[in-house]
Image: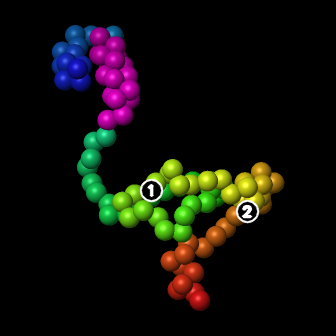
Amino acid sequence: MVDALIEDVIQAGSREELIAATRAMDRVLLWGHYVVPHWHSRVDRLVYWNKFDHPETIPEQGFSFDNWWIDEERARRLREGEELVETPAEEQGADA
């Protein structure tokens, strides 16, 4: 299907056809959650609100979100506008 849409973009005979074809291709690509891998990193990066907690041992192969939960005290502090700044575990060992 994507190949046919690419061909429609290439063969568009007018600006209106080009816009329609690219919008159709955009909808299909966004719906399919396609990823174009162009590099690889050996680490997982994760950004989250600091109201969650997780097991001390994180799975070796990525994050298992089934094991995360909301820390009610952190959630309360966020709602009240307190700053939650915590030093990552790796850095705590270096300063101690």
Give how far across and how far down residue 22 sits, in percent: 32, 21
Residue nearest the observer in this picture, 64 or 11: 64
Few, some or many residues within 10 Å of mark 2 (<14, 14–19, 20+)? few
Quarter assignment of residue 51: bottom right
Q: Which mark is residue 14?
A: none
Judge the density around disc 1: few (<14), some (14-19), many (≥20) Cα neighbours within 10 Å.
some
User: In the picture shown, does residue 6 fall above or below 87?
Assistant: above
Residue on which disc 2 sits? 83
Q: Secondary structure at mark 1?
A: loop
Magenta stretch, overall SS: helix
SS for dot 2: loop
Q: Which residue is mark 1?
A: 63
Q: Is residue 2 magenta?
A: no
Q: Residue furthest bottom?
A: 96
Q: Is residue 20 above or below residue 69?
A: above
Res. 10 visible in picture: no
Left or right: 78 with respect to 86?
right
Splitting the image into 4 quarters, where does residue 7 fall? Answer: top left
- Above or below residue 24? Residue 70 is below
Q: Position of residue 48 (x, y in %)?
A: 57, 54
Instruction: Judge whether residue 91 can be spotted in this image.
Output: yes
Mark 1 belongs to which amino acid?
A: Phe
* Viewer-nearest residue: 31 or 19: 31
Q: Is residue 89 left or right of residue 61?
A: right
Q: Judge whether 21 appears above or below 71 on screen.
A: above
Distance from Cα at disc 1 to Cα at disc 2: 25 Å
Q: Residue at x 54, y 69 (%)?
A: 56
Q: What kind of residue is marked 2?
A: Glu
Highlighted range, magenta: 17-34
Look at 57% across and 61% down and name the residue there.
Answer: 54
Q: Residue at x 65, y 53 (%)?
A: 70
Quarter residue 49 falls in: bottom right
